[in-house]
Amino acid sequence: MKSTTISPLLLMLTILMTTSIQSGVEDRGKYPYDSFEKPQVCQSCHTDIYMQWTQSMMSQAYTHHWDEIEYFDLAVAHAQKVPSLKEPVDGCNGCHAPLAFLAGDLTPPPPAAGSRANESVSCDLCHTISAIQTVDQTPFNFSYVPSPGRTKYGSKPGLVSPHHVTKNLDIYAQAEFCGSCHNEKNPFGIWVKSTQIEWLEGPYSKQNVPCHQCHMPKAWGQNAKMAQEDMVAQHLFHGAHDPGKVAGAIEIRMHPEEREVEIDGTAVIKVQLFNGKAGHKIPTGSVEDRILWLDVTAIDEEGKTYHLPVDQKGFEGEEYTIGSTALAYVDMGLPKGIDNFQGVPRDGIPVGDRIFRMPYFDDQGIMTIMQWNTAKLGVDYRIGPRETKIESYTWTLPDDVAVGKVIIKAQLNYQKLVKPVADFLHVPEDESEIMIINKADTWIEVYE
């Protein structure tokens, strides 16, 4: 394993590419904090919407425990060691603490200080965006155009408010609005977030089903205390952190090739996984952090449990899609100040389980969870919208298997952050807890 070094390639690329990748950088420092109203002002009329927002990740984009640890312990610390990284690291705030970014309050105080950076992606920030900039028609890297003031923008025409001027803009009903922050290019020119691009390339964009329809579903109600009832977009923003959104996102079915298997024979199990719910790939967003894996076990008539490793398919880079004990994430050693850091286990899951991921690599070719330090993307073995993947498991029956019925179980698991990384960085356990996406089972009959 290679020791941690400051790569000349990284230094060169950050110097050359930093400003060009930040499409919203020209607004940094232009708007003092008091240009924007506090969310509590909005609460006085928009009670339900405010309460929905407070429970969403939009309200925690800066204060959420993993975001805080990743930003201060890794990104900011890394920029202190490699000064050319400061601008892209400051750019994190363009989406995670936009009021701080627009005010030029960089690096913002930690959440414990209670500054207005803690408002994260606030009501007034979103509803005073007057345009979305694009490069080659692609929004990315906080490419929103802020126009703070008395005029608030939204998707509905004809609304009147006693507090502000209301104006509808078409961009509030378009996926490009979301792509402003949910697409991201890093200093190496790598798309380290591409959720809106994935949507654009998939079937839902062709059917004019934008992000809002799933993440801000409409229901009958009032959008303000004095408003007439109408269809109102619920400000839930539920996604990768929401167990209810994640549950069932991938459907699973499974079957054996033969129902009856001789005791010294071989069983072949097929598992089908279908993404019938998400308009983007799963997982998406912070793909470098997240791990989605299929665990298959067999339980014989006597209750003995056997783990079944997935059959290899032979595609390039497949080794990164099968659970192993390999070490990775060596580049964390530099910001953490650990010389000759050897990394931590790459996966932290049962060896042989199939992983649905796209690995990120640093310029040394080692897997990284530091997106700003990603020089290359590996094989994309995620599950796309309306895509079905089939995994097979060839199981030579062990000598001690019992005659009778054997139940084969498949469970698709998800973690928001790879557990060995979470443990190393002392991230609260809920970030690496296993969320069950779906389960399935089938059976074979073992005979003599």
Image: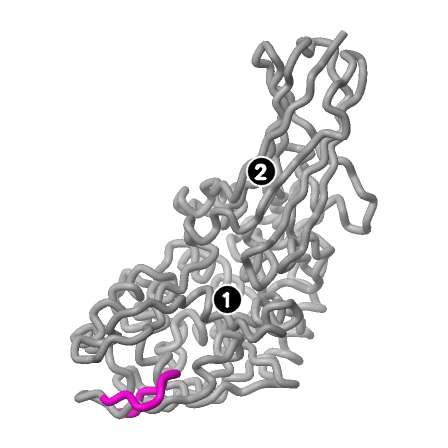
* Dominant secondary structure (helix, strand or loop) of the stretch shown in magenta: loop
Decide which of tag 1 and tag 2 comes sooner along the chain: 1
Q: Which residue is mark 1?
A: 80
Question: How was the colour assigned to the protein in this rendering?
Answer: one colour
Quarter holding residue 223: bottom left
Q: Which residue is mark 2?
A: 348
Point 45% across, 71% down: residue: 212
**Please, what is the three-letter code of the amino acid marked with disc 1?**
Gln
Q: Nearer the viewer, residue 207 or 135?
A: 207
Residue 33 visible in the snapshot: yes
Quarter holding residue 271: top right
Find numbered disc 1 in the image and state the secondary structure of the residue it sits on: helix
Q: Compared to 31, does 364 lie above or below? A: above
Q: Position of residue 280 (x, y in %)?
A: 59, 63
Find numbered disc 2 in the image and state the secondary structure of the residue it sits on: loop
Point 22% across, 76% down: residue: 224
Stretch in magenta: 150-160
**Quadrant in which the C terminus is drawn:** top right
Q: Compared to 406, does 30 lie above or below? A: below
Q: Compared to 36, does 331 lie above or below? A: above
Count the marks: how many? 2
427 in the magenta segment: no
Q: Nearer the viewer, residue 124 or 303?
A: 303
Point 72% across, 44% down: residue: 390
Cα distance between the residues tagged 1 and 2:
30 Å
Q: Position of residue 279 (x, y in %)?
A: 57, 63
Q: Position of residue 31 (x, y in %)?
A: 35, 88
Point 53% across, 41% down: residue: 438
**Please, what is the three-letter code of the amino acid marked with disc 2?**
Gly
Q: Check the image and name the residue furthest to the top.
A: 448
Which mark lies nearer to you, 1 or 2? 2
Residue 263 located left or right of residue 110: right
